Amino acid sequence: MPPRLPGTATAAFRRRPLLWAVVAAVAVLALAGALLLGGNAQRDVGRPGTGQPAAPPTQTAPADDPGGYRPAYHLTPDQRWMNDPQRPFFLNGLWHYYYLYNADYPEGNGTEWFHATSTDLVHWKNEGVAIQKFRNGLGDVETGSAVVDTEGTAGFGKGAVIAVLTQQHDGVQRQSLFYSTDNGYNFQSYGQNPVMDNPGAEHWRDPRIVRDEANNQWLMLLAEGHKIGFYTSKDLKQWTYVSGFQQDGLGILECPDFFQLDVDGDPAKRTWVLAASANGSAEGRTTGLAYWTGGFDGRAFSADGGHQWLDGGPDFYAVVTWDDPRLGDGQRKASRHAIGWMNNWAYARQLPTRDWFGSASVVRDIRLTSDGGRPALASSPTSGLQSLEGEPAQVPGGGIGDGQPFPVPGGGAFKADVELEKPADGTGEARLLLQSDGVTYATIGYDFTAGRAYVARDGDAVAGGQAAARASEADAEYRRAHSLEARPAGDTVRLTAYVDRSSIELFVDGKTLTSLVFPPAGHKEVRLAADGQVSLRAGTVTPLAGIR
């Protein structure tokens, strides 16, 4: 089977790292200037429920990562493959988070649910596989939802953790139920699985379960090709189809989400948000999270306009969002958390890592704001990330020369805050140049004339060298710069870039742009440069500690 174009492949290819990937992996490893060594899959597995990091945070690269690509403060698998995050829930003082994991990659197929816990949504402790693949005759274990069944509606006791997820066997997708009576550490397959058999659909996956308290029911959203199907249930076992939301032009929709937020924090403006991972190629974009705002009557969703995008970058996919049940209704509806798979199916199997593949974004906080009269989601880094911050280094303000140096922490993980003053004539461009041995491998920029922020990575270890010599669409997608419109009010623009050893997450005016970046070997530095009369009002570089 040829490599998948985003949003166009079969579900079997999207969900499973297939055997043919061995050949591709060998070829890609040849181009990597520095390869990573993985760890023991169970190295960080300790006593369930502690929720503490396995080792004290560090600002130096780990000894088992001579290539320098394993992130310092992003969650990665200790070894092998990870992709879709599964929505976290809070129980007994811990956040419980699962992600799709394949310990057999690249030699073997199939994913299962790997479990991680946290007290702060920043430091994660690997707990091991919670739902294993190929155990009940229905195939591997794919994306779904885990919920705490507080009232015991499914019949497994009050407080049981219920996971409803897609299993795929011989290309047929079905929905199965797994339950846990030990707070989400171990799950059993329900004896009457599947709870939803496939009606003959090619795409029928990724159940997102929402508790609809207003109508005393469970609500399920299923990704059904170009449609999101809505189903209701009283017991999480028997499901009834009630409506569908059709959306053409965005490829195959995946990983739906559905939630309420108050516009500008006003409960009188409470609004439903429907989201799905989608393909933006028809709009000159890559894959990402599309969303719609509107209303819901207990059966059907009605959008109040066209779709918008949560992130302008190429590497923020399969996004899940969740609230904090410890908060009151007003606070829970003012903002919620979000996390995504930091990767792209166009080149996910062509990246220069070995023994570990894939990572999650940092957790962001999202809220609904008025944007020209239309509600729009705004993002900011979750406050828990402040626990990783070291002593910031100040960057003197004033005019920007050609390559003004910024201090860069030796561990390669930092936050750069840059406040730029708008030129009097409204034109000009500022650029943060990420360099290795004096060669720019990635650029973070803001164009005052166009009112756009951007990230380009056309000089990194994937875009350059042998990768650049190949003419595949995946390579072209990787080398393409990505930008987003950001026109903050006032005379300044503030860029906040979270830089890790193989990624950039740029925040500007409530918008984000997420990109993987693989620096070539060499001495790392950052320089600030500008065209036109752009000046720096203030700047800081803050080292960020690791979580491993």
Image (cartoon, helix red, strand yellow):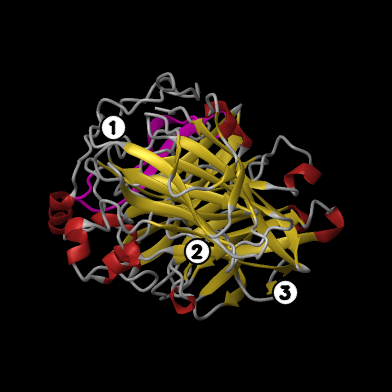
- Which residue has dot 1 on it? 41
- Amino acid on which disc 1 is placed: Ala
What x and y, as percent, mark residue 186? 43, 34
| Tag 2 secondary structure | strand
Q: Which residues are magenta?
A: 104-132
Q: Exactly how many numbered labels are in the figure?
A: 3
Q: Which mark is residue 329?
A: none
Q: Circle 1: is it few (<14), some (14-19), or many (20+) Cα within 10 Å?
A: some
**Quadrant of the frame with the C terminus:** top left
Q: Circle 3: is it few (<14), some (14-19), or many (20+) Cα within 10 Å?
A: few
The mark nearer the N terminus, 3 or 2, is: 3
Instruction: Identify which residue, 226 or 529, lies in the foreground.
Output: 529
- Which residue has dot 3 on it? 304
In which image quadrant can residue 279 be found?
bottom left
| Tag 1 secondary structure | loop
- Which residue has dot 2 on it? 483
- Amino acid on which disc 3 is placed: Asp
In which image quadrant can residue 69 be found?
top left
Q: CA distance from mark 3 to mark 1?
A: 46 Å
Q: Is residue 268 left or right of residue 104?
A: right
- Amino acid on which disc 2 is placed: Ser
What x and y, as percent, mark residue 350? 24, 56
Labels 3 & 1 near each other (Cβ < 8 A): no
